[in-house]
Amino acid sequence: MRTRYKAAAAAFLFATTIGAHAEITTGAKLQEWLSSNDGALHLAATMYIVGVLDDDGVLQAAEMKGLMKPDQAPRHLCASGKAKGPELQQSVARMLNERPELKRMPAVLAVRAALARDYPCS
């Protein structure tokens, strides 16, 4: 009996999560977080930006290991050790103000554009 109950519960959970999907964070949403007075939203913005930096580190490592050709990789970011959360937030907020078209696009594009401009790799 317990096995049937567990199997039914697992099937129900699986069925209800099939329709779930992650929503893309847009530049407008990231700008909303950056301009908010809510500390939790500022933290969310910083974590999003740091996540993009972390992803770039993975891309750089893949390139160094020969898993990705340099011409296939995007322009790398080198903000690590040069900037902290507030500086990263200011960089991205400035980019979103300068290029409003980025607000309609995935936020990762605004983050990459801002950090590539302000923290290029030499």
Image (cartoon, helix red, strand yellow):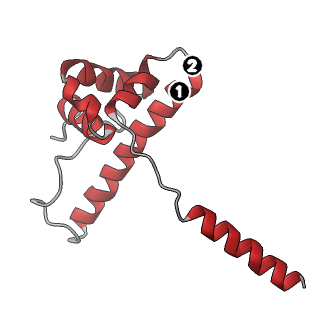
The location of residue 70, given as percent across then percent down, is: 13, 60
> Image height check: is 56 above or below 102?
below
Task: Please state the horizontal and vertical placement of residue 17, each as a whole percent of the image.
Answer: 59, 62
Find out whether the residues at labels 1 and 2 contact each other: C-beta distance under 8 Å: yes
Quadrant containing the N terminus in the rendered view? bottom right
The residue at which mark 2 appears reads as 38
Q: Which residue is at the far left?
A: 71
Q: Secondary structure at mark 1?
A: helix
Q: Tell me, for residue 41, which label it has, or none.
A: 1
Q: Decide if residue 19 is on the left or right side of residue 96.
A: right
* Closest to the observer, 48 or 79: 48
Q: Using a 10 Å C-alpha cutoff, classify the residue at mark 1 as few (fewer than 14 neighbours), some (14 to 19) or many (20 or more).
A: some
Which amino acid type is shown beneath numbered disc 1? Leu
- Where residue 68 appears, as percent x and y from the top left, is 20, 67
Residue at the spot 39% in from the left edge and 30% down from the top edge: 30
Q: Is residue 92 left or right of residue 8?
A: left
Q: 10 Å neighbourhood of mark 2: few (<14), some, or many (≥20)?
A: few
Vertically, is 11 above or below 33? below
* x 54%, y 65%: residue: 18
- Residue visible at 30% across and 50% down in the picture: 56
Which residue is the extreme one toward the right?
Answer: 1
Residue drawn at (37%, 24%) of the image: 31
Q: Nearer the viewer, residue 108 or 16?
A: 16
